Image (cartoon, grey):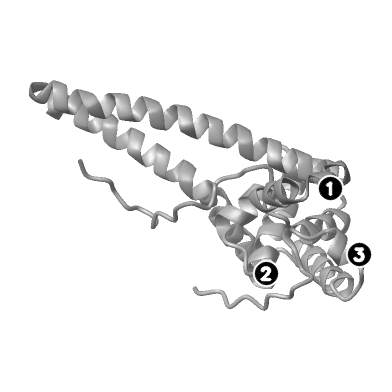
Amino acid sequence: MTIVAVAHRHISVRLIVFAVADSFGVSVQDMRARRRDGKVYHARAAACLLARELTGRTYPQIGRVLAGRDHTTIIHAVERAREMLASDDDFKVAYTAAKMAVETVAATKLAELLRDDEPVTIAARICEYPAQANRLSTWEIISMAARLVALEELAADAFKLLADLDLLVDQPASALALRGPLTSRITSVAESLASLGYANQPEGAQHAL
């Protein structure tokens, strides 16, 4: 099913997370944590579906606001939220309340304070205007820190992958034995890139060496 986003310039994933947390009676911290108990998971799934319906954000972008979850996790949450909307009346009531709250706040100045600034955009702004560095919110600092850590981990994985690829050239007799593990490593790097918004590998796509 293709979703047609009714994107509003004042509706952000961050705003949706706050509205959903209030409607479902959980904290924003719980929604961003790794907890999977029913109440928190339902709220997180609702936020993912609302983000797909009300913003133009991609699955990886939504995942980054929710503490760096990967795109496949967000896809699953969206599908689960649709199922609950059709079968769980309590979920539907809370979801509808959250959606109404988002649409109400979107027309106010508060929505601007809850906008989704990409970590790279924030960093570029600070590089251009260093004096603004002391105006960063805690949320923006955490966002940039998480991005930096993810990029460092990706760089380490990519370096190891390049070293292993060299083995294919240096040890052609071992190519068949090396091919399986390398394919897995390439897939892992591609998924990391997708979660950071640099690539969008179709579901089920396979890499060939």
Between the residue at mark 1 and the residue at mark 3, the CA separation in whole angstroms equals 21 Å
Look at label 2 and name its amino acid. Thr
Residue at 91%, 64% in the rendered image:
110
Q: What residue would you read off at disc 1?
A: 132
Q: Quadrant of residue 95?
A: bottom right
Would residue 74 be found to the left or right of residue 118 on screen?
Answer: left
Residue 17 seen by the camera: yes
Q: In which quarter of the image is residue 78?
A: bottom right
Q: Where is residue 209 in the image (x, y as percent from the top left)?
A: 20, 41
Residue positioned 84% across, 48% down in the render: 132
Would residue 123 appear left or right of 114 to someone viewing this image? left
Front residue (pair 13, 40): 13
Would residue 35 be seen by someone viewing this image from the given angle? no
> Which class describes the residues within 10 Å of circle 1: few (<14), some (14-19), or many (20+)?
few
Q: Mark 3 points at which residue?
A: 110
For marks 1 and 3, the one nearer the N-term is 3
Say which label, 3 or 2, has the lower sequence index: 2
Which badge, 1 or 2, is on the more N-terminal residue? 2
Q: Given the image, on which type of amino acid does mark 3 rest?
A: Leu
Pointer 2: what residue?
55
Return the residue found at the far right: 109
Q: Mark 1: which secondary structure?
A: helix
- Whether 8 is drawn above or below 113: the answer is below
Question: Is residue 139 shown above or below 150?
Answer: below
In front of the other: label 1 or label 3?
Answer: 1
Residue plotted at (32% across, 35% down): 184
Instruction: Kindly report which numbered mark, 3 or 2, lies closer to the viewer in this rendering.
Output: 3
